[in-house]
Each structure stands twice: as C-alpha cells, then as structure tokens.
Amino acid sequence: MQENLSKKGHSKTQGVGRLTIDAVLAITDIVESMHKRVTSHTTEKSVTDKETLSGISGLVYRNIRSVTALVGKSIDGPLAALSKTLDSQPESASTEALLAALNGVLGDHLLFRDNSLAIPMHFRKNGQTLSDVQLSDEIKQSHGKLLILVHGLCMNDLQWCREGHDHGAELAKESGMSAIYLHYNTGLHISDNGEQFANLLESLVGLSDRQLDINILAHSMGGLVSRSAFYTAKISGHKWPAQLKKLVFLGTPHHGAALEKAGNWIDLILGSHAYTVPFARLVKVRSSGITDLRYGNVQQSDWNTTERFEFSGDKRQPLALPENVRCFAVASSANKSINYPLGDGLVSIKSALGEHQNSAFNLQIPDNQKWLGTNINHMQLLSDPKVYQVLKKWFEIG
C-alpha cells in the first residue's frame, strides 16, 4: 500500500502524505510487541509471531501505524494530508484497502469530524456503488434470490476476493443468486452499523413487488453487524426480516475476539504505572468498532452504560439468533489442534460457534449447522476450498 501511495510522490502534498505514512510505522511496533508478550503469557505454549499476528490482528496493527504518529497532538492534520494523497491517486485495490483499514481503526473519529475519508454504507458490486436501478436489475436477473456479503473489521467488499477466489461470486455463479456486497465503516459501533444495514435492507426490499429470498454470508465483525441489523429491524417493524432465509457466519466473534481482549489487557498493564501512562493513551487509539469486539457487543445497551476503555467485564444482554432463519457457523483453528486457544488467530472456536457456558448467551446453533476446520486462519476462511464446499452444501448447491 505504501509503495502505491508514493508512486507519484513529487508534489508537496503527496510528500506530506508519504511523510505521515512513513513516520507512523515505528509507533505500533510498541503495541505489537506488547500484544505478542501478552498473548504468549496467556497461552500454555508460546506461539510464533506469524501465528499471533495472523489475520485481522496483524492487519490492524500494520495499519494503525498510519494514524498514530502524532499522538498527543491533533490527528486531523495528518488525516487531511492523507486524504489529499488518496485523492491524488487513481482508485486501486491498495488504496481501497488502506482506506478500509483506516476506517476500522479511526472510523468513528472520521465520521465525527466529518472527514471525507469516512466510508458511507452502500451496496456495491465489483467495487462500484449500486444505484436503485442497478439493484432492481440484480433482483430481476436473480428472480429475487439474493446473497448479501458483509465483510469484517478493517476490510472492504473487494477483499472477499482472496487468492483469486470469491465465495460470493462462486456461489452466485453456481446457484443463480445475485451476489451483492455491503461496504461500510467498520470503526463505528456495531449497533450503529446494524441500524444502517437494517434501513438499507428495508430500502432494498422496497425496490420490488416480489417476495425476496435473502441470504447473508458474513465474515467476522460482519456477523455481529448482521445480527444487530435483524434486532433493529424487528423492533422497527421492518419487512425484510420475514424474507431472510439463511444467515451464515464465518469466524464471527459472537462472544468476543482475542485481539480486542488482548488490547484491553495492554490498557490495564500500561495504565497501572505512571511511566507507561502515555503508552496506554497510545493504545487507546482504537475505534468503537474494535472495542465492541471485546465481548461481541450487538445492541446499543451492550456498550452505552460503561466507558468503552474500562476493564469492566461483559455487560451484554442476551440476544438470541433470529427466529425462523436458518443460522450456520464456521469456526477454525489456525493450526492442526482444535484446542488451540487462539482459535483462528483472532476468534476462539467457542466464540465463533456461538457457544457459551452461560445458557442465556449460548446461541444454540444446531450441530449439523456448525463446521469446524483446522489449519485455517481467520483470513483463510475467505478462500479455503473446504470452507467453500461447506458453504455450497449449506446453500444447497450441487
């Protein structure tokens, strides 16, 4: 990403943007190192750097570097420079990925400051926002059979394509469904994104007189956003929940993610000593979306009674999965053991399967609608052939 952003680095504005990006690379090394230390002390066996920082964990730490160099000063200046730099570059997968990562880390701040880098929620296809006319055409061409894909933290809709494979495109090709991709700011509270997603789906079903057959495939945080959307829609009296047939979760942290929990431990450890308080402030450069992953917050009531950086324990209210919707869950271990404590490197197996020792929080997904794989990390869930075969079966293809 860094190289792509600097190809034309001749103008003063681009020089400032490149300087901003370069300067921040050193900052997160401190945080990343602490994450490694905390993780290695909370597992029975020390894990390798590659395992510890696989998937979203490494992605967030790599990209948080691009916004935290001037902690203690206003970050709006560097963001303005970065915005100009991005605007001066042709659209590419690399610039889109950088923008998605930036939104994941600081998306709430971007929206609050009305920064043009904040990603608005849209339905997209091939990286292009779909108009109502185009959405209507998608509905007609698929005879109302839709597959909506919801990406995870610090990601975008283009990143469903990994190593030349896109679950959505392949499933659509083999089933006749139309694949539509949600693009959204993952730095916002999950409940806020859920509300927006619910409204967007309600607008979608309003484009057709026919009863739609809606299916959702959600990766990571996207599963929590989807659950939140259904909850919001039900209490708002929306029509689309009655048209939702299947909801499939890929590595969704229903009961929290190791990344945010480890980050919160860093807050606790660093903040307890006067000399390390500045570093604790640095680590607090985490969006509302990231801190919602600590326990898997879905509803506004899960987070609005506590300060989000407090180490105050799980304050969620139980929320069952949607009734009359077939729900499925994929979990994985990043190595060959199903007892690997970090699960896929970000989400533990029990969290991904919705299992909880408190029966009120256990999502009770039927055993024949759960699948557990090994040697698959969090990001590989998007491209692993075994996962795709499971999805084909669940969507009754072939």
Image (cartoon, rainbow, N blue to C red):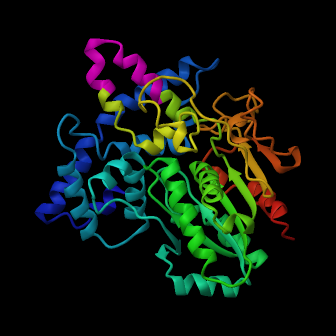
Question: In which image quadrant can residue 325 be found?
Answer: bottom right
Q: Residue, x 23% and y 36% (percent of image)?
A: 71
Task: Quadrant for the C terminus, please.
Answer: bottom right
Q: Main secondary structure of the magenta part?
A: helix
Depth order, front residue of 394/12: 394
Q: Is residue 380 above or below residue 236?
A: above
Is residue 274 a member of the stretch shown in magenta? yes
Q: Is residue 325 above or below residue 276?
A: below
**Left or right, 136 with reference to 69:** right
Q: How many marks?
A: 0
- On the image, the x and y values in percent for residue 262 come to 50, 28
Task: Quadrant for the N terminus, please.
Answer: bottom left
Is residue 381 a member of the stretch shown in magenta? no
**Left or right, 262 with reference to 107:** right
**Left or right, 205 with reference to 159:** right
Q: Is residue 162 visible?
A: no
- On the image, the x and y values in percent for residue 218 come to 64, 56
Question: In which image quadrant can residue 179 be found?
Answer: bottom right
- On the image, the x and y values in percent for residue 64 come to 36, 43
Depth order, front residue of 38/352: 352
- On the image, the x and y values in percent for residue 79 come to 24, 53
Depth order, front residue of 119/50: 119
Q: Residue furthest top?
A: 273
Q: Residue, x 80% and y 65% (percent of image)?
A: 395
Q: Residue, x 72% and y 44% (percent of image)?
A: 320
Q: Is residue 176 visible?
A: yes
Residues shaded magenta? 263-280
